[in-house]
Image (cartoon, coloured by chain):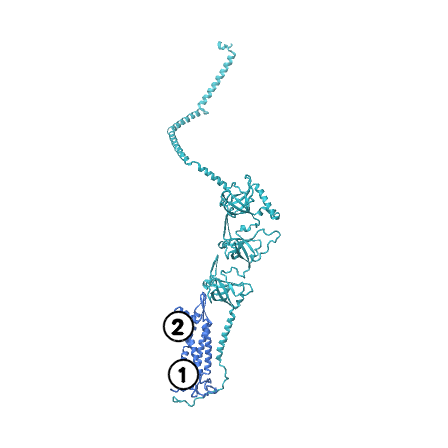
Chain colours: A blue, B cyan
Amino acid sequence: MTRFVTGRELGLMVCTRCRATVRAAVRATEPVSYGCPRCGARVHSRKPESLATTAALLATAALLYIPANLLPVMQTRSFMDIEDDTILSGVLTLIQEGEWPLALLVFVASIVVPLLKIVALGWLLLSLHRGWRGHVHAKSKLFRLVEYIGRWSMLDVFAISLLVALVQIRSLATIHVGLGALAFGAVVVLTMLAAQSFDERLIWDAETHG
Amino acid sequence: MADPPGSLPDDLPHAVPDPPRRKRLPFVWILPVLVILITAAVVIQQRLAQGPTIDIYFESADGIEVDKTKIRYKDVDIGDVIDVHVAKDRKQVVITARIHNDASSYLVADTRFWAVRPRFAGGNISGLGTLVNGVYISVDVGRSNVERRTFQGLEVPPIVTSDLPGREFVLHADDIGSLTVGSGVFYRHIVAGQVVAYSLNPGGNGVTIKVFIDKPYDDFVTSATRFWQASGIDMSIDSDGVKLRTESLSSILEGGISFQALPGAQPPGAPANPPPAPVDSIFTLFIDRERAMRPPDTEVRSFVMYFKGSLRGLSVGAPVDLRGITIGEVKSLSVEYDRDGGDLRFPVQVDIFPQRIRGRNRRDHSQGSDEASETAGRALLDSLVAHGMRAELKTGSLLTGQKFVALDFHTEVPPDHVGWNAEPPVFPTTTTGGLDEIQDSVGSIAKKLDKVPFDQMTARLMTTMATLDETLKKADSLIGQFDGTIAPQINATLTEAQGALKNAKDALGQNAPLQTDLSSTLLELSRAAKSVSALVDYLDRHPESLLRGKPKDPP
């Protein structure tokens, strides 16, 4: 097996701002901070507090995932009545109307993907925290997938914002954004931030160090 | 500085050591805490605002949907239906609703709930909005202080809500007529209230009607107020003719009640306006205005009258009339079999109100004991009957043929008496004059006419006519002859006569020759007469001259 060398092992760091490569010996025991000699920004060998930040964001997202699915995301006020729709009820309505592909799309984008992201990131965090070995490539691929699909989860939010803007026929029907939509948007944003704050290199570090 | 790949340049700059900062909890951990706090706050607030749940019993849950149907007070949402299920006894449905916390004080003992659906009652259409918006449950908040959580829902919306100013009164009637809940109550034709409810009396012998009189008008309801049915068009045909009386158009459609104070009912010395009647006072609902406005008849004497002839035209309620004054009314008409006579009799039971006869000045006397007044009344009636008072049927109106019972004094009637032995007493009757008599006479005339042999008479008449015809023909030919022969002769005769008359005229005319001749003739005649006279004189004096002749004149 080929031995891969990281900058940290060579005592090198790259400034995240100006990309200057600097020399800095890192001793794991004493936490010393370094500044970039060129631009003055802080330099780290790894994202600071990556796991903790990711965990916090992920926890928040997981908490918000519950109201996002329970609270109505959309309130349709027609002259007949007031109808509250959660994400799941919207999917069910689509199924009842025979719009299978659309229902599947909304289901995957709005329910499966955020859940998948939360579960995947959670599992990655847990595995790093516990120092589980193996499946490094799978873990890496999983993380990239999470990072990639993050932006597509906003489909529902886009759909709702379009409807709210378009359907404002005063007396006949108006559509209002529900509290669920807010929570859902927060879930998506938080999972994206969590993915961003996660330092992918830690996956490989764990493999080599452990 | 071209370093070969794979090796590091030696002059790489060293990172500047930065003093380590105080280790602190990462800022991001605020986020989940915040979310938990907000969620907790929202949940607690919802719990607090949730308010109590109530059960409302209805006959049916038509149109009521879980989570959709609202509870509304004055069109403001105060709760939601959270469950609908059939009651355990399967007679009703139970609607469970969660009332908002701020409306929990509305849930008192006399609060009423009803489902608002589209209704078409009388002239009013209500709840049209629920056609599209769906049914909702409306609330009328009561005034009680007793809290309550289980309610019996109303099937019909209450007419009067508790915040409407006015008072309720209770009316007793024999039947409901065309009244219904929501029928108007009128005071001098002004809509003053509504019928709120009605129910059959427990015994089934009448109805009890609840009316609500709105604020300014309820003061007019006093102990002297009379209520009567103003339902629709009141058309009555009685012995006074045809009467048509209506209230407003809406009362024609859905009936109504009128009320007014009885004129002159308050005793003298009482204030002009008696105090308003208290809430839920009980009144009698009269059939019509006339009955309502009648002075109260507390004393009633029943009599039975047996009339000869048909009772057609006599109806229950027809007046008993004493020389134009109504003193009673016909109570019932029936048929009975008279065993003794082996005949059918037609008893007419009448109610006489003696107070109407007594008049005002007798009022004081009537305060004696009942028995005394009873015997006095009998004595009075006996003497009246002895003086010839009889009852008879009279036709009140030729147009309608309605009859009434007339009491009057008749001189040429056989003596009779009141049959006090029977119960009710039998009052003697008679039949004189009237349309019936005329009818009878006409009938007998018709019978007599029937007996006349019109057929034979006709035959004879025919022959007579034929003879007459012949005679006339002869006369005609006679006249023809006359025309042909006699007439010309007459004509000629007449011409001749005319000529003769003309001649006569000529002869007798002033200058006619005849006249002249006659004149001279008469002159001659006169002279002749003179001569004769002279002769007669001479002969008188000289009679001898007849023999000797006239002597010679002396020389």
Chain of the residue where label 2 is placed in the rendered structure: A
Q: In this rendering, is residue B414 above or below A138?
A: above
Q: In the displayed orientation, state which residue is furthest to the front.
A: B340
- Residue A104 is tagged as 2
As displayed, is residue B12 above or below residue B474?
A: below
Residue B439: where, in percent of width, then height? 48, 41
Residue assigned mark 1: A134
Left or right of B352: which side holds A119? Answer: left
Residue A161 appears in view: no
Q: Amino acid at mark 2?
A: Leu
Q: Amino acid at mark 1?
A: Gly
Task: Examine the rendered structure and indicate whether residue B347 appears above or below residue A194.
Answer: above
- Specify the quadrant that holds the N terminus of chain B: bottom left
Residue A179, position as x, y percentages in the image: 47, 72
Tell me if residue B62 comes above or below residue A117 in the rendering.
above
In the shown orientation, is residue B427 left or right of residue A114?
A: right
Q: Chain of mark 1?
A: A
Label 2, residues with CA under 10 Å away: few <14, some 14-19, many ≥20: some
Q: Earlier in the sequence, mark 1 or mark 2?
A: 2
Q: Secondary structure at mark 2?
A: helix
Q: Within 10 Å of the Cα at label 1, are there few (<14), some (14-19), or many (20+) other Cα atoms? A: few
Q: Are marks 1 and 2 in contact (CB under 8 Å)?
A: no
Marks counted in the figure total 2
